[in-house]
Image (cartoon, grey):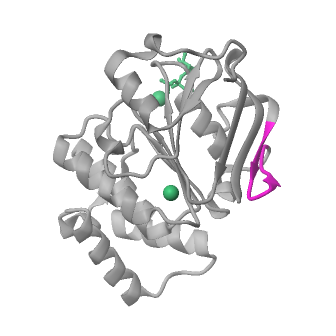
């Protein structure tokens, strides 16, 4: 069944039209990949799905779990199960990773998690991600390496279990081992009740994941949709090598 439905979405930033007529449907159990040249609006799209107020919706709508969320605030969207992993995770001095996760989990679930069970789960998930357990006591992302920041994002995914995970270049700047760990984390998170949208420029993070659709965003809308082979073709030969629909559809 449908989790996210985007209809004819238009988005502007500071009066520049970035997205113009994006259509996208994501069902439960699916993994989608979003590709496109730099500056084409991929981050704009996921930020708009998350309700970032810097992005002005000029037309169309966003439905999540059959509910129109186009005008909802970010925290409402987060509580209803949408999660965005940022391209550049923010450093938050003063709040530890553990406290951040506990607060976020409490906010999403409507009541604070039981401490012991929470600690136990946190420890297990950090182990699965090859994260040093002392990171739980450190301020969120402060002094974390690029790889540890991305792992902290995947840790959130595993601990918060959102319904829809939007992963914006979670693999960028990571060494091969870290990408493999992040990819394994996504795999461990994914099930038939949730869905994932991955923005990436490379193949490594997609290995070992069961990709259902690959979309190409260009000129403000999705110009092509295909299967895993489309991502391989793009990574091999670039965006100019693929045949695109004339009107934004295939
Ligand atoms: P991508 O993620 O595909 O590289 P972005 O969505 O980051 O592309 O950016 C699309 C366009 O929108 C770019 O031209 C970028 O400069 C502009 N843009 C994105 N976010 C902002 C912002 N907050 N303020 C101003 N311009 C922005
Ligand atoms: Mg699947
Ligand atoms: Mg981006």
The answer to whether residue 142 shows anywhere in this view is no
Q: Is residue 127 left or right of residue 43?
A: left
- Magenta portion: prevailing SS class: strand
Q: Position of residue 195 (x, y in %)?
A: 56, 56
Toward which corner of the image does residue 79 lie, by quadrant? Answer: bottom right
Question: Which of 237/114 is in front?
Answer: 237
- Give the x, y percent position of residue 25: 68, 44
Give percent across and percent down for residue 13.
Answer: 66, 22
Q: Is residue 202 left or right of residue 213?
A: left
- Point 30% across, 49% down: residue: 149
Boundaries of the magenta span: 61-70
What percent of the width, then of the height, locates residue 49? 65, 42
**Is 120 drawn above or below residue 188 in the view shown?**
below
- Quadrant occupied by the N terminus: bottom right
Instruction: From this view, report whether residue 109 is shown above or below residue 35.
Output: below
Is residue 71 magenta-colored?
no
In the figure, 35 relative to 123: above or below?
above
**Which quadrant: the C terminus?**
top right
Which residue is at a point 72% across and 15% down the rendered structure image? Answer: 247
């Amino acid at each position: 069944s449908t989790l996210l439905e985007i209809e004819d979405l238009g988005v502007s930033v500071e009066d520049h039209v970035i997205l113009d007529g994006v259509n996208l449907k994501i069902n439960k159990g699916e993994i989608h990949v979003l590709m496109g040249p730099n500056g084409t609006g991929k981050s704009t799209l996921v930020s708009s799905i998350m309700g970032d107020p810097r992005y002005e919706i000029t037309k169309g709508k966003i439905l999540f779990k059959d509910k129109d969320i186009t005008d909802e605030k970010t925290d409402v969207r987060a509580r209803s199960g949408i999660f965005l992993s940022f391209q550049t995770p923010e450093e938050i001095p003063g709040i530890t990773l553990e406290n951040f996760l506990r607060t976020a989990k409490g906010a999403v679930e409507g009541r604070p998690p039981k401490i012991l069970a929470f600690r136990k789960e946190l420890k297990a998930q950090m182990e699965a991600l090859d994260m040093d357990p002392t990171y739980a006591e450190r301020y969120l992302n402060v002094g974390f390496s690029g790889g540890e920041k991305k792992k902290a994002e995947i840790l959130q995914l595993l601990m918060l279990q959102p319904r829809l995970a939007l992963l914006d270049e979670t693999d960028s700047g990571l060494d091969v081992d870290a990408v493999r760990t992040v990819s394994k984390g996504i795999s461990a998170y994914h099930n038939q009740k949730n869905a994932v949208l991955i923005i990436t420029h490379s193949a490594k993070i997609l290995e070992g994941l069961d990709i259902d659709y690959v979309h190409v965003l260009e000129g403000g809308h999705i110009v092509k949709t295909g299967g895993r082979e489309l991502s391989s073709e793009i990574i091999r030969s670039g965006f100019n090598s693929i045949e695109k629909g004339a009107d934004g559809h295939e």
